[in-house]
Amino acid sequence: MEIAGGKMRRFLVLFAQLVRSSLAGEQLQHYEPQPPIKQWLTLSGEAPLVIAGGGFSGLFPESSRYANDAVTQSKTRAALSCNLQLTKDGIGICSSDIRLDNSTNIIKVFPNHSNTYNVNGNQLSGWFALDFTSDVILKHVSLVQSVSTRTNVFDGRLQVSTVEDAVGVEPTVFWLNVQYDVFYAEHNLSVLMYLEKAKGLMDIDFVSSPELGFLKRMNGKVTKARTKLIFEFLDPDVVEPTTGQKYGSILNDLLGIKPFVSGILVPKEYIWPVDANKYLGHPTTLVADAHKLGLEVYASGFANDMPGSYNYSYDPTTEYLQFIDNPEFSVDGLLTDFSPTASTAIACFASDETTKPKKGKALIITHNGASGLYPGCTDLAYEQAVNDGADIIDCSVQMSKDGVAFCLDSADLTGHTSASVMPAFMSRSSSVPEVQKDMGIFSFDLTWGEIRTLKPQMESPFQQTAGLQRNPEAKNKGKFMTLVEFLDFAKANAVSGIMINIQNAAYLASKKGLDMVRLITEALSNATFDEQRTQKVLIQSDDSSVLSMFRGFLAYERLLHITKPIGDVPESTVNEIKKLADGLVVARASLISIENGFTVARTKVIDEVHASKISVYVYVLRNEFVALPFDFFADPTRELATYVAALEVDGVITEFPAEPGALLKQAASRASAPANPPNPSLEVADVVDPPLPAVISASQGSSSGMAITANFCLCLAVIMASDFLSFFIKL
């Protein structure tokens, strides 16, 4: 099994270039065909087509004016897709469902107008377009976001679009999907007649349908050079209404449908199956088989906020590339709710290796190794980080009771190891308010021999709140590293640098008799990191007194970790920081303020600190879409590019861009919650700590806190919108 984690450096560099061009004032223009820079494995040899399902429906209500307009700004050839529904008076509107319940406010407007119909053998109840005239729908009904995890701030502001409205935005390619010809015919509405009239008024480049009978009748009424007919496959066990065959059976006879279609549209799982555990299986031969018959293959079901497989590590770009940039085949198009990400994947990340630019200045720094893929601070996490091309691998140093320094994100073992489920360790739980407010099982109360018996534990920060689990097959894989082993690993793999994070040094010295700073200094010296400049050494701590202990080591850079969000750094504080550190490590919210899920503005922090030649590093970047503001389109690569290219941070700390405020201006003010208070300034008192206390002897060490009895049950508690959004209509 291969888990996606590579291409990080390539993403960073390419997006940096793209964002810089945008910030320099280059406006994104309507797509114009360009000479191909690579030979694609599509049927035509041209780049895959991006099909925007209902426009940019991943952000805006489906087929709304905003969603449709967005498609015209694509970096590659893109189609605007409209799912055709007919009103009572035979007017075509765009809606993915035959019922309007989920995508409009029709229930509130007409609460007593629901109905029940037999639709292709299924009894469906709801508010159907054919029960209302177009005039009623267009005047009284407005659109809402149909997916609950997406922003609702545009709800109620935009009217339903007719097919003519969609064509009116002048997309490069227009794709009309006819879902229910049989149903409408049963109610004396003719899709065929509607299209006969529409063809004379508009250009329709693609017509797709899951009904073979409809496509056969259309075959003699369109010119293939002008309009391609595409057969849409539904789930394999669903029965096709005009033949009585299951779609899975029809798939075995592509030759039988070839005479009247130019291609097929299939769920992505038809091409790359996903097993019951959400891991990729082996690809089918569908694309190759269809291409041999001269049929194009379009894949559907893509959405940045609907993860398909753990193999993609919650990175939608990786998923798109799996279908268009693998050595065996490329689909001819991708149907997606997030067309900007698919477009960028084609335009930027599927290019020839020879086009890869040189690396930018920003450092990619791991957070506990590649902890989005493997348990943090294990050998597997560090090996993956090296394979992914990370510049700096990190070790947050913890101490065992018998003085062994090792790498782990926290001194509390409950979230990172199996300690919380092992009775022998649960009784060792205690309260140490100097370290954290919650009770825990702390490394400094256990010997290294005891700690080594524990299994690593994969952390999934959004599993409980959003059900997003990380790579469960690796849940307990790998082994922990001592600091010495980590340093040896960094040397052996010739990484560009290391970051040593020092926590709780004062507590360990005064209460446990453990001189963490001395042990780290000696380990670095023994590994000769103090005598070389080839590999960068970053020393990070939230305690300025710890950093002062490394002042005499010219080979090391000292980073002050600011644990709370800040909004600005006064000159007096900046001057104090210069005495203590070479750089600041700050949270994302300290650089870009966020309200109600949208970016609002960049803070003054990075400009104030950079003006004094102090580096700025941002943490922690995660791939899961719930960790991202809506402005980043559920795309972690856009967030990365924003911090690297737009804000020009010196490094990003990551486990796996967008002009702030541009999108929020369009949101309904009535839907916004009260603004958050601004982050506080960073004051001198926040950065200057008292000197480290003397190290007491081990015999003087006090217990770490109140012990908890053995029967105590421990509770187990994620391009560039700056150019893309330039087209938005100001309200």
Image: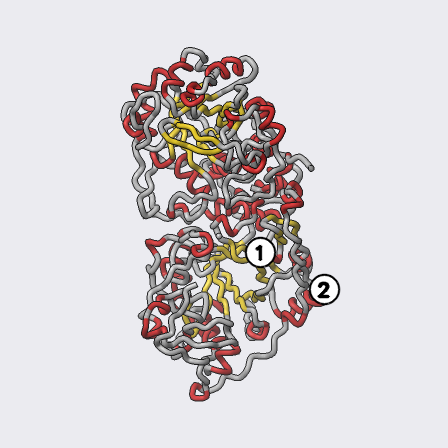
- Residue furthest out toward the right: 571
User: Which residue corresponds to mark 1?
Assistant: 588
**Residue at disc 2, secondary structure:** helix
**Residue at disc 1, secondary structure:** helix
Quarter of the figure with residue 292: top left
Whole-percent x and y of residue 151?
56, 44
Whole-percent x and y of residue 340?
53, 37
Which badge, 2 or 1, comes first in the chain's sequence? 2
Q: Quadrant of the C terminus?
A: top right
Residue under the image location 61 percent in, 78 percent down: 690
Q: CA distance from mark 2 to mark 1?
A: 21 Å
Give the residue type at disc 2: Glu
Whole-percent x and y of residue 263?
39, 23
244 or 706, which lies in front? 244
Residue under the image location 44 percent in, 56 percent down: 464
In this rendering, would 518 be left or right of 232?
Answer: right
In this rendering, would 148 be left or right of 378?
Answer: right
Is disc 1 surrounded by few (<14), some (14 to 19) or many (20+) residues within 10 Å?
Answer: some
Residue under the image location 51 percent in, 78 percent down: 507
Give the answer, above or below, for where 335 lies relative to 153.
above
Residue under the image location 41 percent in, 73 percent down: 441
User: Which residue corresponds to mark 2?
Assistant: 571
Give the residue type at disc 1: Arg
Residue 602 shows up from this direction:
yes
Is disc 2 surrounded by few (<14), some (14 to 19) or many (20+) residues within 10 Å?
Answer: some
Quarter of the figure with residue 519: bottom left
Whole-percent x and y of residue 164?
57, 22
434 or 132, which lies in front? 132
> Which numbered disc, 2 or 1, marks the residue closer to the eye?
1
Give the answer, above or below, for where 134 lies relative to 478.
above
Give the answer, above or below, for where 419 lies relative to 238.
below
